[in-house]
Image (spheres, grey):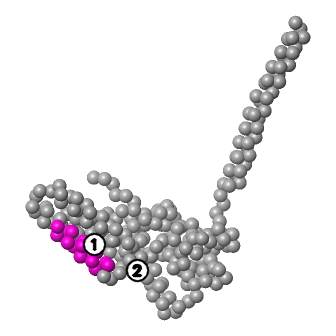
Amino acid sequence: MSENKPDTVPGLGFKDKDKALETLKNLEGRDPDYQRLSIKGLIGRAKRTLTLTKDKEKIQNINDAVKVFEDFLRDFEINNMSKENRAYLPLASVQSLLPLKEKFDIKDKLVEAFLEAYTKKAKGEYKNLRTVLSGEGKPSWDIVRNVEIKKLLKAMEESRPDMWEDDLPTKEHLELILWAYSPDASKIKKNVSNYEEKLGSKKPDSDEDEEMDDDDDDDEEEEEEEKPKKKPEKARRRRRETQEET
């Protein structure tokens, strides 16, 4: 049996109707687009399996599972569930605005745990949050994130706060951003370097060291270029001395 990928929810399958229902339960609360793509993928695999199966009972069981999945997709489209999808901000975009967290005095242990999971356990890859649990016996972080974003958006519908001030996110906007979501994601992603400069959030890197290394490499190349020049000059002097001696 192959090991589950870090970005793939375990326990999905199409063996029979019960397995299909279990699959839907395992996908519940996750990003809607991921749910849709997962179910479509399972239907495709199930239909390929049917072409290789002769056992009538297995065929019936798989068809029952496919029916469950097709009903799910129909309801998904009718309810326009894709509108509930909350695309992730890249980790770098979130980190560029972290100094505002201190400015607004936002202290939330759940947010802190999410950011740590996104940074360290998921290694900045949002898909991996699907298999990173928020605690023992607790849901994975992708599910927790969707729940928290939904709460914040509902509160914002009532209060209708400003999202920007002086080209920076407001406190209410930042509370969403800390969950790696923003209605203005494209604007944030385009201005990461500006935020880093304005807020001093850029992490120290090894650019200077690399430049020093590059300089050293240049020096070594210059020395290597000079060496072959000296050798022909010495050789010419030796030839002249030999000619004079003869």
Kind of residue sitting beneath label 1: Leu
Which x, y percent locates residue 194? Answer: 66, 71
- The mark that comes first in sequence, 2 or 1, is 1
Residue corresponding to mark 2: 83
Q: Main secondary structure of the magenta part?
A: helix
Residue 214 seen in the figure: yes
Which x, y percent locates residue 223? Answer: 76, 35
Residue 178 seen in the figure: no
Q: Looking at the picture, does residue 192 appear above or below residue 168?
A: above
Q: Which residues are magenta?
A: 63-77
Residue appearing at x 28%, y 75% in the figure: 73
Which x, y percent locates residue 1? Answer: 27, 52
Q: Are marks 2 and 1 in contact (CB under 8 Å)?
A: no
Question: Most extreme residue toward the right, as rendered?
Answer: 244
Q: Is residue 153 covered in magenta?
A: no
- Count of numbered labels shown in the rendering: 2
Question: Most extreme residue toward the left, as rendered?
Answer: 56
- Near mark 1 (Cα within 10 A), the count class, few <14, some 14-19 or many ≥20, is many
Question: Most extreme residue toward the top, as rendered?
Answer: 246
Figure quadrant of residue 46: bottom left
Figure quadrant of residue 60: bottom left
Residue appearing at x 38%, y 65% in the figure: 131
Q: Looking at the picture, does residue 63 appear above or below residue 150?
A: above
Residue corresponding to mark 1: 24
**Kind of element beneath mark 2:** helix
Question: Most extreme residue toward the bottom, as rendered?
Answer: 158
